[in-house]
Amino acid sequence: MISAIIVAAGKGIRMNDKLRKQYLVLAGRPILAYSLLAFDVCDLIDHIILVVPKKDVDYCWKDIVSPLKLYKKINLVAGGEKRQESAYNGLMAVDKDTAEIVVIHDGVRPFVSQAQIAACITGAKEYSACIPAVPANDTLKQVDSSGFICDTLKRDDIFLAQTPQAFQYDLIIKAHKNARREGFAGTDDASLVERLGGNIKIIYGSRRNIKITNREDLIFATALL
């Protein structure tokens, strides 16, 4: 079984809005709805687990999920204080007896395509772990704690990670449990697998697959639509 975990339990502080960013309306639909629909129409996905803030579970079911009339089974799970904890809660909701591949996606990346989802799943089947990323275009500067440049990094080998990130279930659950045991906090799920020494295949993502974090991102997303 291939399960999709859509993580949408963030507080959206940088958006500076009373409404959490995943619920903000983008061209008539909540941002989160676009991610849900993309995974719902992907034939390779068997089951969707949506992770949202604990106090929003009822709201999400009534106002976000139900109006979409999704085809696939969807399970709402309460998230944690941090994204990593929310992803772990989603993993714990996966049926361990039938789990094969797990695809973890940021709910505020509304422009993910079926092709990207399928490519990540194919990569995970072959390499155990696969994520999309795009090459860095800008010059990369390393800055010290005082805000001064201390080095210019070679950008040729630098990629900017995106989601969905796909993993064999046994690998990603092991990586999360190891991180919890050692008190390690990563910026994405792939970083937890890296700590185990696991190989992660990079495939080319899309520059349209933006993560909506602040007001400028919302303006850009509207323009893309």
Image: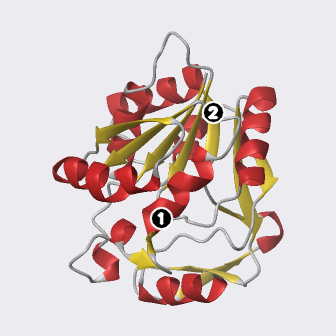
Could you say where residue 202 lies in the image, as x and y percent from the top left? 77, 49
Residue closer to the observer: 52 or 37:
37
Q: Which residue is mark 1?
A: 108
The CA distance from mark 1 to mark 2 is 20 Å
Quadrant of the frame with the N terminus: top right
Image quadrant in which the C terminus is located: bottom right
Q: Position of residue 195 (x, y in %)?
A: 55, 36
Check disc 1 and report its element: helix, strand or loop: loop
Q: Earlier in the sequence, mark 1 or mark 2?
A: 1
Residue with the most extreme left position? 55
Q: Residues within 10 Å of mark 1 (few under 14, many from 20)?
A: many
Asked if residue 87 lies left or right of residue 122, the reply is left
Residue 158 quadrant: bottom right
Q: Which residue is mark 2?
A: 167
Residue drawn at x 42%, y 87% as measured from the top left:
215
Which amino acid type is shown beneath numbered disc 1? Val
Q: Is residue 201 above or below residue 177?
A: below
Q: Is residue 164 above or below residue 218?
A: above
Q: Position of residue 210 (x, y in %)?
A: 60, 71
